[in-house]
Amino acid sequence: MRSLHYLRLARLQHVLMGAMTTWLVVTMSDGSTTARFFSPLAIGLDILGASLFYFAAANKMYILKDRSYALYKKQRVVVTALGLMAMLGAIVVATCCLSRLCVCLTIFNALVILYYKDFVSKRWWSKNPMIAMVCVTPILIGWAAGENTHPSVPSAAILAFFAYLVREIIKDIQDQRVDRHLRLTLPLVFGPTLARWTAGFLLLLGLYFWLLLAASVPTGQYHVFVPLLIGLSYFGRVTYSLLLSKAGQEAKESKQILIGNVCLILAFFLLVV
C-alpha cells in the first residue's frame, strides 16, 4: 500500500486541525500548562484512532467509492489495532491528566466510532447528530479542560455543531449510491430535495448562534470580525444554495462549510494572540 494511502486513512490534516482547535479553546478558557499540552494530545489521538479504526472497519464501503482504498486482511488487522490503541491512548491521557468531563468525552467518541458501522450509522437520526457531536469535541474538550468559560466558546460550539450536522446531510446526498441498502439516510428516506431543505433550515438556525458569537467578542478586538464575516459569507452561501438550488452542488457546499469552520478557528486564534 502506498504511503499516500496511509496519509489518507490517517487524515493527519483533521488530527492537526482538531488539536489546534482544542489548544486555542483551552487557552481561551484559562487552562493550566498541563491542560494546554495534554488536551490537544488527547483529541489528536482520538481523531487519529477514529480515522484508522473506521477506515479498516468500513473498508468494503470505502472500496465502493474508490478501489484504491482496498486493504488486505493483514493490513485491516494492523490498521484496526493501531486505531484501537490510539483511542485507548486518548482515554488514558484524559484519565491521567484532564478533568472527568474530558474523560467522558473521549470515551463517548470511542464508543460512537466502535459502534458506528453496525449501529450508529444505520439510521439518519442517530448517524448525523452523533457524528456532528464527535466533530465538536475538540471545542468541548478544550472548554472542559479550562478553568473558566470564555464568552465566545458556547455559541461557537453550537454553531460548529449545526455546521457539521449540515455537512453530514450533504455528504449523505453525495453518497446515496453507496449508502443504498446499507443504511437509512435522510436523502434515501425523504429524498434529496427535502434533505437539502432540512439542511438549509438547520444551517439558518445555526447562524443565529453566529450572531451570539459576534456579540460576545470583547470590546476593542474588532479584528476578530474579519474571519467571522468571511465565515458568515461561506455559511450564507451554503444556506442559500441548499434552500434555493437543486441537488448537484454538494461537493462545493461541503468544502464551503469546512472553510467556514476554519474561519471560526482563525477567529479563536485572534482572540488568543
Image (tube, rainbow, N blue to C red):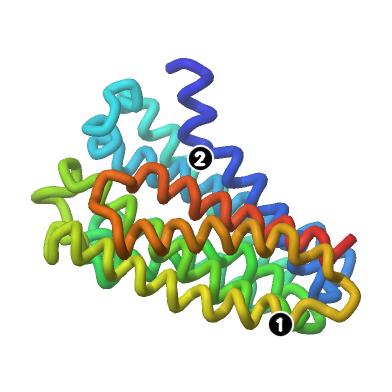
Q: Residues within 10 Å of mark 2 (few under 14, many from 20)?
A: some
Q: Quadrant of the N terminus?
A: top left
Q: What percent of the width, then of the height, locates residue 227?
A: 71, 58
Say left or right for 169 vs 34: left
Q: Is residue 81 visible?
A: yes
The mark nearer the N terminus, 2 or 1, is: 2
Q: Is residue 154 above or below residue 129?
A: below
Q: What percent of the width, then of the height, locates residue 45?
A: 61, 50
**Tag 1, which secondary structure?**
helix
Q: Is residue 112 visible?
A: no
User: Which residue extends farthest left?
Assistant: 181
Q: Kindly identify the residue that appears in the image at 57 percent across and 79 percent down.
A: 209
Residue 215 badge: 1
Residue annotated with mark 2:
82
Q: What percent of the width, then of the height, locates residue 119?
A: 24, 63
- Residue 59, by quadrant, is top left
Q: Quadrant of the C terminus?
A: bottom right
Please identify, in this view, whether the residue under mark 2 or under mark 1 is nearer the observer: 1
Say left or right for 255 vs 217: left
Q: Is residue 85 above or below residue 121?
A: above
Q: Is residue 204 above or below residue 250?
A: below
Which three-letter amino acid code belongs to the residue tagged 1? Ala
Near-viewer residue (83 or 2): 2
Q: CA distance from mark 2 to mark 1?
A: 43 Å
Q: Kindly identify the residue that appears in the image at 33 percent across and 21 percent down.
A: 68
